[in-house]
Amino acid sequence: MSDTKFSLSSRRTFLAGSAAMLASPALAQSSLQSEATTELEKDLTESVRRNVSSFRTLDWQPYFSNTNKGAILVDIDSRAVHFWSEDQSIYKLYPSSVPLTEDLTRRGRTSVTQKVVGPTWRPTPSMLKRNPEWPAVIGPGPDNPLGTHALYLSWTYYRIHGTHDTRKIGRRSSNGCIGLYNEHIAELFGMTQVGTQVLLI
């Protein structure tokens, strides 16, 4: 009888101890995950803080002598597009994609020469040379790299346009053009006109 009591008691103690031992790694893992999450949150916070500091509002005067027909400033380094209306009552700031490399980047003054809803995309000869498998033409639609709207610039092949691939925004991801979210290019498209000044810095 005492043997039975002892074995039941021992069994209970063993089971309780085993449960505690099994729980220990879970508690330790939970603690480690909590520490890792805290570190990750700290990293993300610092990253966001750095991004916010570079993504800031600007005044038009250092870049343009006037805002006749409106003005667009493309800041390649901060990956941002700024817009001022002609009467300066409207100011907009948009995140953008920028060219992959400095070789593909063009800086300087240009202007909007054409506005197209549902643009057709044709890769440049140099793009086709680098990527011979690309199609020669892509019409309007979800596969079009120019998105829903495009502002054609006075420089051949250069555009400010939308994109259906939202992962590209905020990155060096284009072959020379400046990309915006489709909703942003639609808004900018509505505010600009042929002749709007554009400066890429």
Image (tube, rainbow, N blue to C red):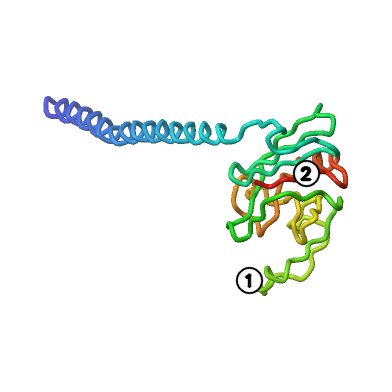
State if disc 2 and disc 1 touch (CB < 8 Å).
no
Q: Is residue 38 left or right of residue 60?
A: left
Residue 38 horizontal/vertical position (percent): 41, 31
Snapshot quadrant of residue 27: top left
Name the residue located 63 percent from the left edge and 71 percent from the top edge. 130
Residue 158 horizontal/vertical position (percent): 74, 57
Residue 64 horizontal/vertical position (percent): 74, 38
Q: How many marks?
A: 2
Name the residue located 85 percent from the left edge and 52 percent from the top edge. 113
Residue 92 horizontal/vertical position (percent): 74, 33
Residue type at the position of mark 2: Ile
Q: Residues within 10 Å of mark 1 (few under 14, many from 20)?
A: few
Q: CA distance from mark 1 to mark 2?
A: 28 Å
Q: Which residue is mark 1?
A: 130
Residue 178, relative to residue 62: is it above or below? below
Q: Residues within 10 Å of mark 2 (few under 14, many from 20)?
A: many
Find numbered disc 1 in the image and state the secondary structure of the residue it sits on: helix
Q: Which mark is residue 201?
A: none
Snapshot quadrant of residue 23: top left
Find numbered disc 2 in the image and state the secondary structure of the residue it sits on: helix
**Of 69 and 64, the residue lying toward us:** 64
Name the residue located 57 percent from the left edge and 32 percent from the top edge. 52
Q: Which residue is mark 2?
A: 185
Residue 127, relative to residue 182: is it above or below? below
Snapshot quadrant of residue 102: bottom right
Q: Is residue 123 left or right of residue 11?
A: right
**Of 123 and 28, the residue lying toward us:** 123
Q: Is residue 154 left or right of residue 102?
A: right
Name the residue located 68 percent from the left edge and 47 percent from the top edge. 200
**Of 116 and 108, the residue lying toward us:** 108
Residue type at the position of mark 1: Arg
Name the quarter where the N terminus is drawn.
top left
